[in-house]
Amino acid sequence: MWSTSESSSEETLLCSICLEVFSEPVSTPCGHNFCKRCICEAWDTDGLCTCPLCNRNYYIRPELSVNTLLQVQCDVCSEPKLKALKSCLVCLSSFCETHLQPHLTVSGLKRHQLMEPVENLEDRLCPKHQRPLELFSAERSRSSLLHTQAHTQHMVEQRRLKLQEIQRCVELSDTEVHRERAEGLQVFTALMQSVQRRQELFLEELQEKQRLSHKRAQELVQQLEQEICELQKSSTEAEERLSRSQDPLHFLQRCPALTPPAGLKEWSSVSFEGEKCEGSVARAVRELQKELSDQFKQ
């Protein structure tokens, strides 16, 4: 891992506008460094000359100073080193205008890969092949691309298969839900019908018991009312005869009207009890449970 000082040193080589390594680094009067192209384009776009870092305003466009400390220097020059124009990926060196001439004129050097000047060319070597990354052949690039595409296609196919698997699971789940729903509706419909039927039977049973109780009570009431009428009639006849008789004592001894009518019931031994309803609910529930149990066994 880099140390804090290494990380800080790396950050000082980056332009705060493009966030890349400085290209033609220049300094503003306030001391901040930018790529010449970046700061000029920023000022041209905004129409104002303001430092992007400290926001210092310049009413007149200031002169930018070339930062020789940050620019890539020629690796061949002795002190003072001149600014490098190009870097060679084969020589792994940077050259100023003078020392670049052999790469522009010598046939063997013309084939070298040149690029814009950069620091630390060693970092651009492939760690496996120890060759510049930019020099890999187009064929190898195509091979790498094909490998990447094949890998991508494989990942796409994996995801398509997973998509199909999920869709099948959803279909199976829907089928199971529909089946359970149909079965559940059938079961609960049968349950409700059984409950409804048992409720009707329960109410009919109570109604029948009530009818029988009323019928028996009505029969007793009719008998009582009839005997009351007979007794009242007998008493009325006796009073009328007594009022017409000239010898009341003889009348009382001889009059059959004073004898109670024949066929009267001995009501002291008669009692009335309504039909027993206690336990009807519990019995109805037990019968319902048995019926439901038989249905589930089927």
Image (spheres, helix red, strand yellow):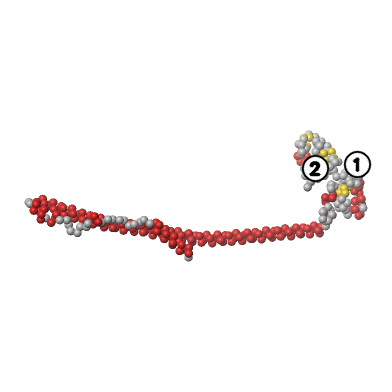
Mark 2 nearby-residue class (10 Å; few <14, some 14–19, many ≥20): few
The mark closer to the camera, 1 or 2, is 2
| Secondary-structure class at tag 2 | helix
| Secondary-structure class at tag 1 | loop
Residue placed most toward the observer, 230 or 279: 279
- Mark 2 lies on residue: 5
In the depicted structure, whether residue 230 falls above or below residue 31? below
The kind of residue on which mark 1 rests is: Pro
Q: Position of residue 95 (x, y in %)?
A: 89, 47
The kind of residue on which mark 2 rests is: Ser
Q: Position of residue 62 (x, y in %)?
A: 81, 36
Q: Residue at x 87, y 53 (%)?
A: 90
Q: Position of residue 108 (x, y in %)?
A: 91, 54
Q: Quadrant of residue 167?
A: bottom right
Q: Position of residue 156 (x, y in %)?
A: 69, 58
* Residue situated furthest bottom in the rendering: 298
Tag shown at residue 80? 1
* Residue situated furthest top in the rendering: 59
Q: CA distance from mark 1 to mark 2?
A: 27 Å
Horizontal side, residue 190 vs residue 226: left or right: right
Residue placed most toward the observer, 276 or 183: 276
Q: Quadrant of residue 27?
A: top right
Horizontal side, residue 47 vs residue 66: left or right: left
Disc with the residue nearer the chain's start (1 vs 2): 2
Q: Quadrant of residue 207?
A: bottom left
* Residue situated furthest front in the rendering: 269
Q: Are marks 1 and 2 in contact (CB under 8 Å)?
A: no
Report if residue 41 is visible in the image: no
